[in-house]
Image: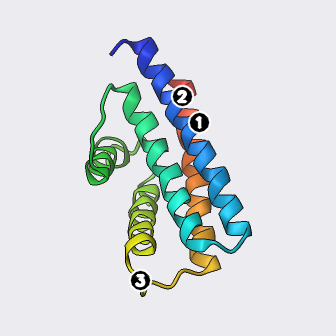
Amino acid sequence: MSPKISKELSRHRLEQAKEDLISAKLNYEHNLYKSANNRAYYAIFHSIRAVLALDGIDFKKHKDVQAYFNKNYVNAEIFPKAMGRKIAEASRIREDSDYDDEFIVDSEKTNKQIVTAEELIQLVEKYIEEK
């Protein structure tokens, strides 16, 4: 993949992340917490994939995307270690929200996921511009 294509793909994925964040906020405003958690997680996921696009890297499985990001960006302290923990929590909450009928979602947990998505989008946007 050429550098130009990877930068364009990176920006495209970041735009997807921003759209997912808007959707998360709209769902949250209407007390649709499960949907808001899902969209906040996908905002995070697409942000991570935006970073990986700059290296021409991608994976089919979410866990592989997260593992690569943690190994090569969080552990290398390109992104804060705390963000790695927040991403793991968002992934767990999204899975529980989507697949566990007994999982109770609330406003506070959901808002936390949205804030994490916002933080990561800002960090990724800065990273892409500096790269």
The image quarter containing residue 85 is bottom left
What amino acid is at disc 2?
Answer: Arg
In percent of the image, x 28 and y 54: which residue is there?
63
Residue at mark 2: 11
**Where does the image place residue 120, in percent across and percent down from the top left?**
54, 49
Tell me the crowding category of disc 3: few under 14, some 14 to 19, or many 20 or more residues within 10 angstroms, Cα based: few
Marks 1 and 3 close (CB-CB < 8 Å): no
What is the distance, in whole Å, between disc 2 and disc 3 at their CAs?
36 Å
Secondary structure of the residue carrying tag 3 is: loop
Does 3 sit above or below residue 98? above
Q: Nearer the viewer, mark 1 or mark 3?
A: 3
Q: Earlier in the sequence, mark 2 or mark 3?
A: 2
In percent of the image, x 57 and y 26: which residue is there?
129
Marks 2 and 1 close (CB-CB < 8 Å): yes
Residue at mark 1: 15
Secondary structure of the residue carrying tag 2 is: helix
